[in-house]
Image (cartoon, rainbow, N blue to C red):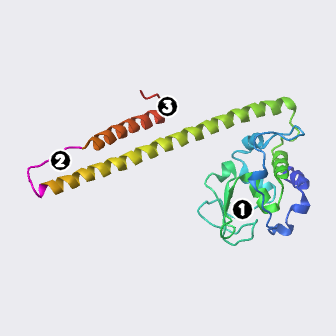
Amino acid sequence: MMQVAIREQIPKSRNPAGGQPNGGICSTSTKNYSKPDANNQLSFIEVKKVAYGKWESIHRALGIQLKTMSHAKHTACQGCGGKDRFRVMPDYANTGRWICGGGVGNTQVEDGFELLGHVFGWTPQEQLKAVADYLGLSNMDESKKKALRIAAEKREREVQATIAKRYEQTRRDSDVLTMLENLIDEIRFRQHLQREAMKFNKAFIAEPTIDEVNTAQELNAAILEAYAHQKGVDYV
């Protein structure tokens, strides 16, 4: 009964007849992920929190029948009409993420809301309303909406903090690799000096250059800092 009720609220004029693609493309650039709209409705962040892990049933209820849940298999796209351009991402069940080749230079990787725009041509607000209606959020009282907003904002801060930490760790790891390459270059240079010197004096041993020593020290410090950051402790 819930699926019937939800389908009746779908903007039918924008739903391709007979399940045929209409080529509707909806860009995330027009979507507000942080603030509820003027009608005090829930925002994308809040609805997304409730939708987490439910995207397969959401899409099925709203009229999108995916032939496979395998992220390794390409299938026909209900949005652009391509025969083998579409596939879901590994985290599709949780986030609704998908990818469509869409032809050369038009690849899209979007979330569960955007699939509704891609297939049906719905605007961001139509996407939001349809998902919120299916999840039973549209008639939620203000106290529950407030609690959901607080929880969603907390979750968003946690996600952003995790992303920032991963970015910083990637930067530190990149520094380590760069310094390691520099050290290898310095060692190779000393080996070159050793070979050249041995042409004249077989007993000669080329000592590490000052640049080699400094690079080794910098590499050691970078490794320790990267490891400390990964463990969440300060490196002194």
- Which residue is tagged 3? 232
Residue nearest the viewer, comparing 231 with 137: 231
Q: Which of marks 1 and 3 is in front?
A: 3
Instruction: Kindly report the distance in space between the C-alpha atoms of the residues bearing marks 2 and 3.
Output: 41 Å
Which residue ends up furthest to the front in the rendered image?
200
Pair 2/1: label in front = 2
**Can you give x and y, in whole percent of width and height, for residue 230 in the image?**
47, 36
Amino acid type, residue under disc 1 in the picture? Leu
Q: Do the residues labelled 2 and 1 touch (CB within 8 Å)?
A: no
Magenta residue span: 198-208
Q: Position of residue 46 (x, y in %)?
A: 76, 39
Q: Which mark is residue 66?
A: 1
Is residue 66 in sight in this rendering? yes
Q: Percent from the top left, x then y, of residue 83? A: 69, 72
* Relative depth, front residue between 124 and 7: 124
The label on residue 206 is 2
- Give percent across and percent down for residue 119: 78, 62
Q: How far apart are marks 2 and 1 (CA)?
A: 66 Å
Tell me: residue 224, above or below residue 55: above
Name the secondary structure under disc 2.
loop
